[in-house]
């Protein structure tokens, strides 16, 4: 089980359990099931309205933060100005994830996360 803490300046933080590694539990799905108001439109990684900032609550030497960015995420995050080409190349070199993710695309792994929306 993973704990996901959703945080927003307009709402009280809410921590929920997520089934890690289910391959169907996206951040957006977990948020909707728990009545957390993350904005979204297409739910398919095309529009970028569900962009969130994700940080690991785990040890600093283990920054997993979900699986790697999907191709859709890379394209959309670049188009909305959350990632530059240089940042994407640096992520590959350093093998570090981006804090910016699309809630509809990011699948929860076995790690505790903070999701800012």
Image (cartoon, rainbow, N blue to C red):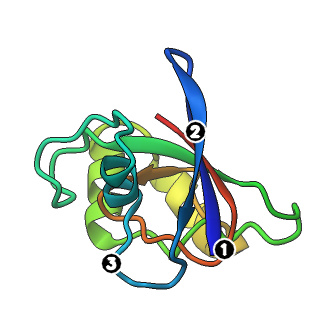
Classed neighbour count for the residue bearing mark 3: other residues with Cα under 10 Å, few (<14), some (14–19), many (≥20):
some
- CA gap, disc 2 and disc 1: 34 Å
Classed neighbour count for the residue bearing mark 2: other residues with Cα under 10 Å, few (<14), some (14–19), many (≥20):
some
Residue that label 3 marks: 24
Q: Which sits in the foreground, 63 or 34?
A: 34
N-terminal label among 2 and 1: 2
Q: Nearer the viewer, mark 3 or mark 2?
A: 2
In the rendered view, does 106 fall on the left or right side of 42?
right
Residue that label 1 marks: 93
Q: Residue 60: x percent and y percent?
A: 87, 61
Q: Which sits in the foreground, 29 or 59?
A: 29
Question: Where 101 falls versus 24 (above or below)?
Answer: above
Residue that label 2 marks: 14
- CA gap, disc 3 and disc 1: 29 Å
Residue visible at 69% across and 62% down in the picture: 112
N-terminal label among 3 and 1: 3
Q: Residue 59: x percent and y percent?
A: 88, 64
Quadrant housing residue 37: top left
Q: Nearer the viewer, mark 2 or mark 1?
A: 2
In the rendered view, does 97 fall on the left or right side of 78?
right
Residue visible at 38% across and 71% down in the picture: 25
Q: Secondary structure at mark 2?
A: strand
Q: Nearer the viewer, mark 3 or mark 1?
A: 3
Q: Quadrant of the N terminus?
A: bottom right
């Amino acid at each position: 089980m993973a704990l996901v803490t959703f945080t927003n300046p307009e709402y009280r933080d809410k921590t929920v359990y997520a089934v890690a590694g289910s391959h169907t539990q996206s951040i957006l799905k977990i948020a909707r099931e728990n009545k957390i108001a993350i904005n979204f439109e297409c739910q398919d990684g095309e529009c970028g309205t569900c962009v969130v900032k994700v940080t690991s609550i785990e040890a600093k030497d283990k920054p997993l933060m979900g699986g790697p960015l999907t191709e859709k995420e890379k394209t959309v995050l670049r188009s909305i100005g959350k990632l530059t080409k240089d940042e994407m190349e640096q992520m590959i070199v350093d093998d570090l994830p981006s804090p910016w993710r699309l809630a509809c695309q990011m699948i929860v792994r076995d790690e505790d996360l903070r999701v800012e929306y």
